[in-house]
Image (cartoon, rainbow, N blue to C red):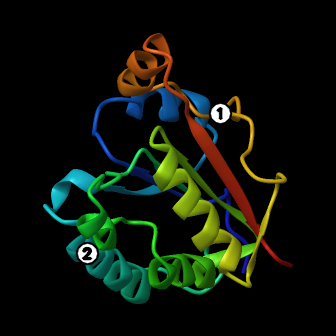
Amino acid sequence: MSRPAPVQVNWLAYPGTCRNGLAAGRSARAWRLRVDATEIAFADRLQGRIAQVLERDVADAALDEVRIYFPDPWHKKRHNKRRLIQAPLVAHLTSRLAPGGYVHCATDWEPYAQQMLEVLSAEPGLVNTADTYAEKPAYRPLTKFENRGLRLGHGVWDLVFRKRA
């Protein structure tokens, strides 16, 4: 069965910070399942909720794109377990990606970028599109947090992984 347009999930850490840019950059997309990370207080609860949504409402190989921009980095080491990008969630997402579909993550916290790179690289169904971190794709809009960080000299790390065919 063919779909009229690719399906994407936009996972925004801060609603309203780049939503309009996403809509403008991808106006040709037919529909979107959008989950805002701020709906739930802790990432571990969010992981459970998105896993339920993926299991219940999204068929295997149904997604063409998953974008997770600036999830909470949980800076303290004892809180790292609450980070959104963890192996179980990445495995769920990968099972729902169509062959050739991709996961795109972005963060402004280097230790979290390193963890994301480790977790995504360890998923056997995904392959990195870059040697390590990707250049910022033109379709990803700048958020107000990213603009502020760039003005302060902070870095931003993009990771783009494709599902193996």
Can the viewer see residue 31 in this picture? no
- Of the two numbered discs 2 and 1 on the same chain, state the one appearing first in sequence: 2
**Residue situated in front as seen by the camera: 87 or 153:** 153
Residue hosting label 1: 139
Q: Position of residue 130 (x, y in %)?
A: 82, 51
**Residue situated in front as seen by the camera: 46 or 19:** 46
Q: Position of residue 81 (x, y in %)?
A: 31, 73
Q: Secondary structure at mark 1?
A: loop
Answer with left or right where residue 67 lies relative to residue 2: left
CA distance separating discs 2 and 1: 29 Å
Q: Position of residue 60 (x, y in %)?
A: 60, 86
Which numbered disc covers residue 44? 2
- Please state which amino acid type lies under the numbered disc 1: Tyr
Q: Position of residue 28 (x, y in %)?
A: 64, 40
Please name the residue shown 45% across and 67% down the image: 85
Can the viewer see residue 99 in this picture? yes
- Quick check: 2 above or below 10? below
Q: Secondary structure at mark 2?
A: helix
Answer with left or right where residue 90 lies relative to residue 134: left
User: Dot 2: within a 10 Å radius of its alpha carbon, few (fewer than 14), some, or many (20 or more) residues?
Assistant: some
Answer with left or right where residue 35 lies relative to residue 63: left
Most extreme residue toward the left is 41
Closer mark to the observer between disc 2 and disc 1? 2
**Which image quadrant for residue 136?**
top right
User: Dot 1: within a 10 Å radius of its alpha carbon, few (fewer than 14), some, or many (20 or more) residues?
Assistant: few
Please name the residue shown 53% across and 63% down the image: 115
- Quick check: 151 above or below 78? above
- Please state which amino acid type lies under the numbered disc 2: Asp
